[in-house]
Amino acid sequence: MPPHSAALTRLREHPTTALANLPTPLIQLSRLGETLGTNRLWAKMDAETGFALGGNKVRKLEFVLAPSMLEGVTCLITAGGPQSNHCRVTAAFAARQGIRCVLVTNQGPEGDPTGNALLHRLFGAEIVLAGDRSERAILMDSVADELRAQGEIPLVVPIGASTPLGSLGYARAAIELCEQLDALDDGCSETLVFSASSSGGTLAGLIAGLALLGRSDVHLRGVSADAPATELDDVCRSLAGEATELLGAKIDPGTIPFASIDDQVGDGYGLPTPASREATELFGRHAGVVLDPTYTSKAAAALIAHMRSHGVRDHQRIVFLHTGGAPGLLA
Ligand SMILES: *Cc1c(COP(=O)(O)O)cnc(C)c1O
């Protein structure tokens, strides 16, 4: 019996709006593994959650946009960068529901919108421009006030859906991943997972799920897209604790081997580095897998750097959690 079976039952039965195609595949990247010196490299393909081109935001929004949250709601408001994957999925959901969507984003480059910026508009979202990233949260609240004055009932979806509730999407994903790992029957006793990390909900959910399962054999590396590692560590651990409290459980996030890595950020958020470009080429050429410039290419660069400097230990597998983002490559 796992240590927190009542909380796990609550997690499995928690009401959601079903959006994702689950389980996402766990695939072996044999050729890419060969070029990196291992036959134990895998990818958990959350790029293929499906809804509105997929990615990790779909799992989080299944909880944040659960039916009880949407009662009476006539408009969704959220925020992100001009190439935000989170804004894309939120806008597509509003389109499918037939409700308004207002996106608070920063100004993108001049010219016709491309990639996610194009999709935000295709899904019919209204765009409100924010001067800089720090302005976005305040602007969402003032947009909400304006809409209320117009008689709308807005729901503000926090950036990245990285709330304790949204993180539960990745706690559930941890259960799904563990079931797939256990079915491999390959004699490995330890798994090292690399994932991109920014607002922290993805890693927080994984920490929470693994702690509820009591799985200290799965080690997590959250590869930062922007923030310093110490800051991101704190965000992830506290979100993980709050997420499990929603399920009536108290975990010690310290029991799960987890660390944030910030040595792939380079010149900053969304800016490619030589290593992220190389990762994009290797994953494309040797695996047919599309990485994005902001998140997954940097997470993959961290995985490659780890394998080159440490190799793969006996009885260890490496898993790349592919969190999506392909529209960003085409922007
Ligand atoms: C948002 C996003 C992330 C970061 O996930 P968080 O839960 O915000 O840490 C990683 N990869 C992609 C493709 C994303 O869109």
Image: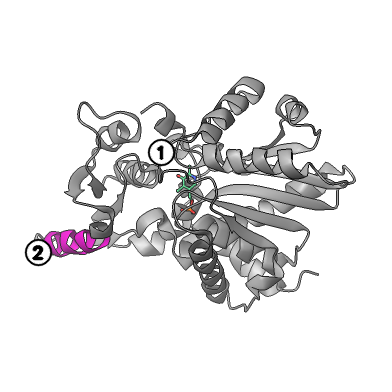
For disc 2, the marked residue is 149
Q: Tell me the CA gap for discs 1 and 2.
A: 39 Å
User: Which corner quadrant holds the N terminus?
Assistant: bottom right
Image disc number at residue 58? none
Query: In the image, is 9 to the left or to the right of 113?
Result: right
**Numbered range of the magenta stretch:** 137-148
Read off the residue under disc 1. 271
Of 263 and 159, which appears nearest the observer? 263
Instruction: Please provide percent x and percent y for residue 37.
Output: 79, 32
As helix, strand or loop, the secondary structure at mark 2 comes to: helix
Colour theme: one colour
Relative placement, left or right, of 327 versus 91 is: right
Q: Is residue 184 visible?
A: yes
Q: Residue furthest top?
A: 285
Q: Residue at x 75, y 73 (%)?
A: 3
Q: How many marks?
A: 2
Please tell me whether residue 243 belongs to the stretch shown in magenta: no
Give how far across and how far down residue 287 sits, in percent. Answer: 65, 25
Residue 271, percent across and down? 41, 38
Residue at x-position 66% and y-position 76%:
252
Choose mark 1 or mark 2, whichever is in front. 1
